[in-house]
Amino acid sequence: MRKRIALVVALMLAVLAMVGVGQVDAAMQLRFGHIQSEQDMWHLSSLNFKEEVERLSNGSMTVVIFPTATLGGDRDMAEGLQMGTLDFSLIAGVLGNFEPTMQLLELPYLFESQEEFSRVIHGPIGEEIAQNVLGSSGIRILTWWNRGPRVVTSNKPINSLADIQGLKIRLPEIPAMVETWRVMGATPTPMAWAEVYSGLEQNVIEAQENPIPFIYGGRIHEVQKYIAMTNHKYEYVTIAMSEIRWQALNDEQRKVVVEAARISAEYKNQLLIERTQAILDEIVAGGLTVTHPNKDEFAAVARSVHENFAKTVNIGLYNRIMETIGTR
């Protein structure tokens, strides 16, 4: 009997020890969603973020990535961040639906170069906008990734402003962009990214606009004939984080997340520089024809919207943006 009791006690202690070890070694699992394909730079750079989090935390934190809008569109994931059901997401202009000052970055032809844009988002104005987003939405911007300029794909050549009159162009659900394209004469059609390929294939829409790598990642070149180098908006995407999750982390875990985000931004921005031209060459070789419309013509009309739009958001901040890039 004593031997049996001793054996039972030994087994219980072994089980408890195993449970204890499991509890100590169990990694914190973090969920990361985005809307792009697994071939896109977004996904490759997300994998880099995941690797860095796991390396810097010595495996005590792990990241599970959900690509291709598995968890919904940008707005769905932003709401997931707010509720704490999602930890990280790659989100850009849709954050403007939660924080108005974000909309100022979405005005087409506000910036003339990547350098101008970077000067704003990586300086005091970018920090201020990020704080505004945090305060109004409970979503924390960890870093900004460069995406390059947005260009237009279509099934007819675009060489001038006259060519976009009445054009049914898909846009993200971003008021600043919708209003500007309407003033330029197009027919804006807000649509979730996951629906764009089929929308073009079925002629529900005639055109869309995005950075070149994003166009390639979404296989848009398969259902469009022309690409117009409008360069109408210098683009970004943020690694956005749920403030609920941030508050649940300790100081060391926060340092891991911030450093991994910084490293991933360097990785993504270098990837953009190295691959964009090669991607354009590939889709042109596949049959897409490039046009080079007069950007000044487009910009003149687009900029007629800026100040009035800014008055509905934050005219003081808009004026500071203009001063930062030397326009004022």
Image (tube, rainbow, N blue to C red):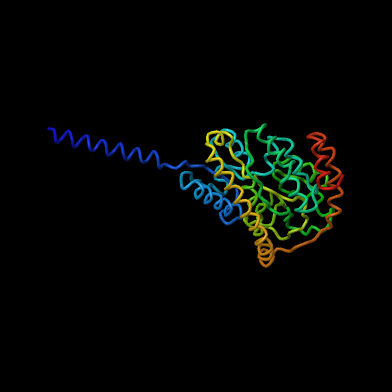
Tell me the quadrant of the picture where the N terminus can be found: top left
- Above or below, comparing residue 113 to residue 103 in the picture: below
User: What's the residue at 62%, 36% (across, down)?
Assistant: 139
User: What's the residue at 61%, 43% (across, down)?
Assistant: 73
- Tell me: 324 left or right of 146: right
Instruction: Return the residue found at the far front.
Output: 252
Residue 128 x/y as whole percent: 72, 38
Q: Nearer the viewer, residue 212 or 23?
A: 23
- Tell me: 178 left or right of 274: right
Q: Quadrant of residue 19?
A: top left
Q: Nearer the viewer, residue 21 or 135?
A: 21
Q: Quadrant of residue 176?
A: top right
Instruction: Return the residue found at the far bottom.
Output: 285
- Tell me: 263 left or right of 156: left
Tally of numbered tags: 0
Residue 192 x/y as whole percent: 65, 44
- Above or below, comparing residue 113 to residue 324 in the picture: below
User: What's the residue at 25%, 35% (across, down)?
Assistant: 12
